[in-house]
Image (spheres, coloured by chain):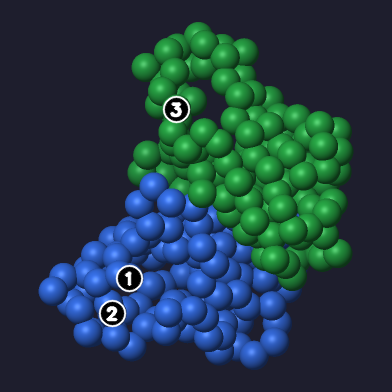
Chain colours: A blue, B green
Amino acid sequence: AQSVTQLDSHVSVSEGTPVLLRCNYSSSYSPSLFWYVQHPNKGLQLLLKYTSAATLVKGINGFEAEFKKSETSFHLTKPSAHMSDAAEYFCVVSSLWGKLQFGAGTQVVVTP
Amino acid sequence: SQTIHQWPATLVQPVGSPLSLECTVEGTSNPNLYWYRQAAGRGLQLLFYSVGIGQISSEVPQNLSASRPQDRQFILSSKKLLLSDSGFYLCACKPSGSQGTRDTQYFGPGTRLTVL
């Protein structure tokens, strides 16, 4: 079985400062891991995914995530937050047949 | 690349009324299709998935049902809505030719359902 835990339900950052969203997972398989972003009343957009290639994964909009097997973590970072980054972020682990297990989400607030 | 359409975008329905939400996919054939629900303040819950026409797997017992009458059409239904059915319903697609755990699901824009 697999599960995913997002350690922060809310993160508030100032514009131009770094963003860190924490995610830990457990999986019986060699996992695929994803980060999705959801803006209010919108569908989910894929930011990046890890599929056992490079452990440092670069995504869209300047985001990146590092897969650390020893720590069972897949934290999402961005060096400099932008106002448009305000949204909800989901860490996701994939099981067999593409069934996704979602974290509870982290709401990001960006202040001027 | 695939495109996922959902309609309606928003819906307000009284308790006890029927429901039909539709999802169609363009740009791929024989995809895996999924229905998720996102209730207020909660994460996403997988409701149904389908690996082919007429093949539906239910993840959570409830008063909802799903059907896949065509390869790229996925419908979520209810005969009598409950207040607890309110939420944001998302359709997702995993394109064909992809197996196992390595592949991405793409999401539609969602339907906001309010049951009064």
Q: Which residue is mark 1?
A: A85
Residue under the image location 37 percent in, 39 percent down: B40
Secondary element at tag 1: helix
Q: Do residues under tags 1 and 2 come within 8 Å of each other at their CB atoms?
A: yes
Q: Residues within 10 Å of mark 2 (few under 14, many from 20)?
A: many
User: Front-most of B40 and A26?
Assistant: B40
Indicate the amino acid at tag 1: Asp
Q: Is residue A19 left or right of residue B25?
A: left
Q: CA distance from mark 1 to mark 2?
A: 7 Å
Q: CA distance from mark 2 to mark 3?
A: 34 Å
Secondary element at tag 2: loop
Residue B111 image position (x, y, % from top left): 49, 38
Seen in the picture, residue B40 relative to A77 is either above or below; the reply is above
Q: Is residue A55 left or right of residue B74?
A: left
Which of discs 2 and 3 lies nearer the camera? The answer is 3
Q: Which residue is mark 2?
A: A81
Decide if residue A63 is in sight here: yes
Rendered image quadrant of residue B74: top right
Q: Chain of mark 3?
A: B
Q: Do residues under tags 2 and 3 come within 8 Å of each other at their CB atoms?
A: no
Which of discs 1 and 3 lies nearer the camera? The answer is 3
Q: Is residue B59 left or right of residue B12?
A: right
Q: Which mark is residue B11?
A: 3
Q: Chain of mark 2?
A: A
Q: Is residue B60 left or right of residue A20?
A: right
Callouts 1 and 3 in the same chain: no
User: Front-most of B114 and A67?
Assistant: B114
Residue under the image location 61 percent in, 70 percent down: A33
Residue B64 image position (x, y, % from top left): 63, 24
Residue B6 image position (x, y, % from top left): 58, 41
Seen in the picture, residue A80 relative to A97 is either above or below; the reply is below
Indicate the amino acid at tag 2: Ala
